[in-house]
Amino acid sequence: MIAIGPFRIGKYIFYEKENNGYPDCTIDLNVKLLRTTEQIVHGNLQVDIETMSQLLGKNVSLFVYFENGKPLGMMCGCKGSCYIRGPGIPLIQSDDTVYWFWIYTLPEARGKNVYTKLKHAFFSFYRDATHFSALVDPDNTIMCSEMHKLGFVPTRLYSYIKLSTISLLTIKEIPSNLVTHSLEIGNRHNLLVI
């Protein structure tokens, strides 16, 4: 994302995956499914606690990896439709589709398999979902590669220009290359805001 004055400009690849099962694995005891933000208030995960508190009261699940009581990584899932505030994208999807987002490991925890342990817990928890989706910045080549390894398929490329709550979206379908444009003015579908 680039900010130019009051404008935000960026791109996201939309990945989708049918749930074909996930290998059985041991869930690390350091991974916790949180229902409140109390345990991460004093961590360094750069989470807006107020926003996260609101989301946890809805369809959102927060997985956090702790080591010696300190949160070192997190990821979230949202069942059903939601509105992605940053680019202004309404994700209209079935109630049994899980949107995978806010995947983050602190720099000092990288190389400790924190992401892998969180991923095992995430996919085990959502084993009954029929589909998964995710938005990934195309410059995040590590996560784009991970999406492919996990069997996710890129189905759309979103490009956006946003001013306040108004987004001009260009949506390119993959692989057909069909391009559509959409003017989104706020959360007009009244979806859960992420």
Image (spheres, rainbow, N blue to C red):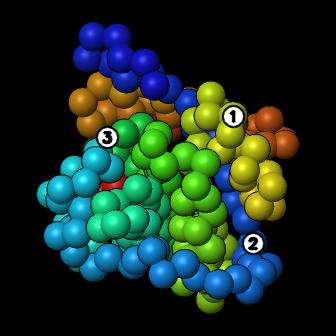
Give the spatial CA distance, label 2 vs label 1: 22 Å
Residue 83: x percent and y percent?
38, 55
Residue 36: x percent and y percent?
22, 75
Q: Given the current orientation, which residue lies at the most extreme right position?
A: 175
Q: Amino acid at mark 2?
A: Glu
Q: Nearer the viewer, residue 183 or 149?
A: 149
Which residue is found at the position 68% from the left and 39% from the top?
Answer: 142
Q: Amino acid at mark 3?
A: Ile
In the depicted structure, whether residue 73 falls above or below residue 122: above
Q: Secondary structure at mark 3?
A: strand
Q: Depth-wise, is mark 2 or mark 3 nearer the camera?
A: 2
| Quarter location, residue 17 | bottom right
| Quarter location, residue 161 | top left
Q: Secondary structure at mark 1?
A: helix
Q: Nearer the viewer, residue 103 or 161?
A: 103
Q: Is residue 180 visible?
A: no
Give the spatial CA distance, label 1 vs label 3: 30 Å
How would you rate the neighbour count of disc 3 (Cα within 10 Å): few for under 14, some for 14-19, many for 20 or more? some
In the depicted structure, whether residue 36 falls above or below residue 44: below
How would you rate the neighbour count of disc 1 (Cα within 10 Å): few for under 14, some for 14-19, many for 20 or more? few
Q: Amino acid at mark 1?
A: Thr
Q: Earlier in the sequence, mark 1 or mark 3?
A: 1
- Residue picked out by circle 3: 185
- Residue picked out by circle 2: 18
- Residue picked out by circle 1: 141
Indicate left or right for 128 with 185 as reference.
right
Q: Given the current orientation, which residue lies at the most extreme top position?
A: 5
Q: Depth-wise, is mark 2 or mark 1 nearer the camera?
A: 1
Which residue is found at the position 69% from the left and 60% from the top?
Answer: 16
In the depicted structure, whether residue 194 falls above or below residue 128: above
